[in-house]
Image (cartoon, rainbow, N blue to C red):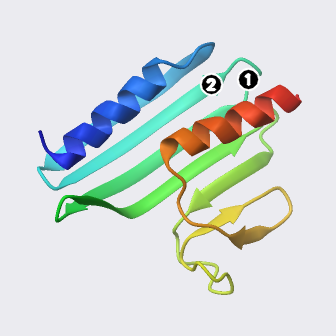
Amino acid sequence: MTVILDYLERVQALVSGLSQVEIERYEERVLSPERGNLRFRLRFSDNSLLEVSEAVHSVGGALVWLSYRHHYQKANGSVVFRYDNTPHHPEVSTHPEHKHGPDAVVSAVRPDIERIFEEVRVHIKQV
C-alpha cells in the first residue's frame, strides 16, 4: 500500500462511519503512487454542509498537502469555518495556511480530518 492509498482509505472509513449524514459527493483520484486528490460534500442532520477538497503528495513517506480547503457552513449558507492554504492572507503568521471564521481570518494550520469532523460535531450540538 502507498501512503496516499492508506490516507484515502482512512478518510473513506471515517466518512462511512458518520451517522445521520448524507454523502452528496465523494471523489478520490489517485494520480500516481505519490499523488492523490480528494473531494467530498457532506450534508448533516441540521442541513449544514461540509465540503472538503485536497490535493495530497507523498514525500519520503510523509503526506504534504499541495492545496486544501475544508469549508463548513450553516444551512442558511453562512460560513462557520473554512481552513485553506490559498496564499491570499499574508498578514497571518501561518501564511499561507489560515482559518476563516464568521467574522475574521486567523492564523491556523491544516487540521487533520478527525479534527474537522469534531469541530463540525461541536457546531451541530450548539444549534
Q: Looking at the picture, how far across and down is residue 100, in whole percent?
A: 71, 61
Residue closest to the eye, 10 or 85: 10
Q: Residue at x 53, y 39 (%)?
A: 114
For residue 93, side relative to residue 48 (left or right): left
Question: Is label 2 in a helix, a strand or a loop?
Answer: strand
Q: CA distance from mark 1 to mark 2?
A: 6 Å
The amino acid beneath tag 2 is: Arg
Other-residue count near label 1 (Cα within 10 Å), few / some / many at <14 / 14–19 / ≥20: some
Q: Looking at the picture, how far across and down is residue 33, in whole percent?
A: 11, 50
The amino acid beneath tag 1 is: Asn
Residue closest to the eye, 9 or 86: 9
Residue 91: assigned label: none
The furthest residue to the top: 20
For residue 4, side relative to residue 101 (left or right): left
Q: Tell me how many marks there are.
A: 2
The furthest residue to the front: 61
Other-residue count near label 2 (Cα within 10 Å), few / some / many at <14 / 14–19 / ≥20: some
For residue 26, side relative to residue 71 (left or right): left
Residue topped by disc 1: 47
Q: Are marks 1 and 2 in contact (CB under 8 Å)?
A: yes
Q: Quadrant of residue 60?
A: bottom left
Residue 57 visible here: yes
Q: Looking at the picture, how far across and down is residue 106, in whole percent?
A: 73, 70
Residue topped by disc 2: 43
